[in-house]
Amino acid sequence: MIKTIILLKESGSLEKRVALDPKNCERLVKAGFKVIVTPDAGINAYFSNNAYEQAGAVVESPTFDEKAIILSINAPTKTLTQKFKAGSLSISLLDPYRNLSLVELLAKQGVDALALEFIPRITRAQSMDVLSSQATISGYQSVLIGADLSPRFFPMLTTAAGTIRPAKVLVIGAGVAGLQAIATARRLGAQVEAYDIRPDAKEQVESLGAKLVDTGVNAAGEGGYARELTEEERAQQAAALAKHVKEAHVVITTAAIPGKRAPIIVTKEMVESMLPGAVIVDMAAETGGNCELTKVGETIKVGEVIITGPRNLPSTVAIHASEMFSQNIYNLIAPFITEDGFSLNLEDEVIKDSLITHEGKIISDRISSLISA
């Protein structure tokens, strides 16, 4: 049983979020946990040390001298991981595909590690799904960035100087981020088209008032994600999309494949065909980008087209992003809280899919196969 929760302070230069907010901290304290908050853990999300103390937490640098649930947004550093007590549980966006050496270290330390990215997309786990909650923020922010960079109005305006026609926005990828982008662009008055390779996206796109671009490619994958396209499908997709990209004033790309490089959808030739002043907001920049010319973390001009590759969009809305992330964490932990503390149920479907290491072993087949290969 675990009766202590430790909240880490994020170390990334762009990271303003915190994994546990004072509201859910108080709920966990009332459930019988000792909650230790690293000083200034929430300061960049406007949650003061005093707010955590008022919620019942102890604000001090953790010593890791007892088993604990260790919470963070991003994967803990190797230096910090070496201090974790065996039998502890680390919960974070572990990014295990790209952090294989950290996964090995966690197993060596005897620390159980749960990767939030691996929480299954099933009905029961929707309230625990941090990828969805944070993607909602990314989709919203991507449209605001596009509107800010665009030299055009989004809505139709009737003025004494004449009528301004609405901007044409193309959203590529109609997952959680894409649907939020569609909804936000529509609220701003834009004319919106969307594209997704999963056929079940049509109803969702049209329910938001957008038109679905049909390329004839169906690449629905497991778990609600898109699978990787064949070369023939990629060519068919590009040919059909080229016309819509050419006519768009703002293109927002959201396509991602878990554990792999983001697929290139907007080619150099497509960019060269775009209207003067057109904008591309590439939400997949951090995993390689959906646009062939994207530079991660930069806003560039290619001819007369503006291309931006933002990093860590959820962090730019740090208060709400942290509150949503924290609620996801509480919903994940709550079913396993007993009068004696926290105990994992290894037979639970959510835990089965998302637990990477357990009792000194790498138990996730998806990750162990990469390490042994």
Image: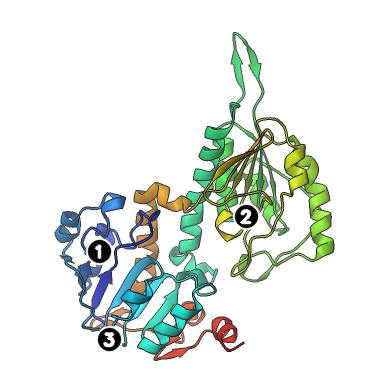
Disc 1 + disc 3, Cβ < 8 Å: no
Of helix, strand and loop, which one carries label 3? Answer: loop
Asked if residue 287 lies left or right of residue 109, the reply is: right
Q: Position of residue 159 (x, y in %)?
A: 59, 12
Local secondary structure at mark 1: helix
Q: Residue at x 61, y 9 (%)?
A: 161
Q: Which residue is mark 3?
A: 1
Residue occupying image coordinates x 79% and y 54%: 237
Answer yes or no: is residue 216 visible. Answer: no
Separation (CA) of disc 3 from disc 2: 43 Å
Quote the CA–CA distance across marks 1 and 3: 19 Å
Q: Quadrant of the C terminus?
A: bottom right
Residue 345 appears at what percent x and percent y? 40, 85
* Residue contact at pointers 2 and 1, CB within 8 angstroms: no
Secondary structure under tag 2 reads loop
Residue 331: where, in percent of width, then height? 38, 67
Instruction: Please report the residue visible at 55 percent of the width from the left and 68 percent of the height from the top.
Output: 121
Q: Which residue is mark 1?
A: 25
Q: Amino acid at mark 3?
A: Met
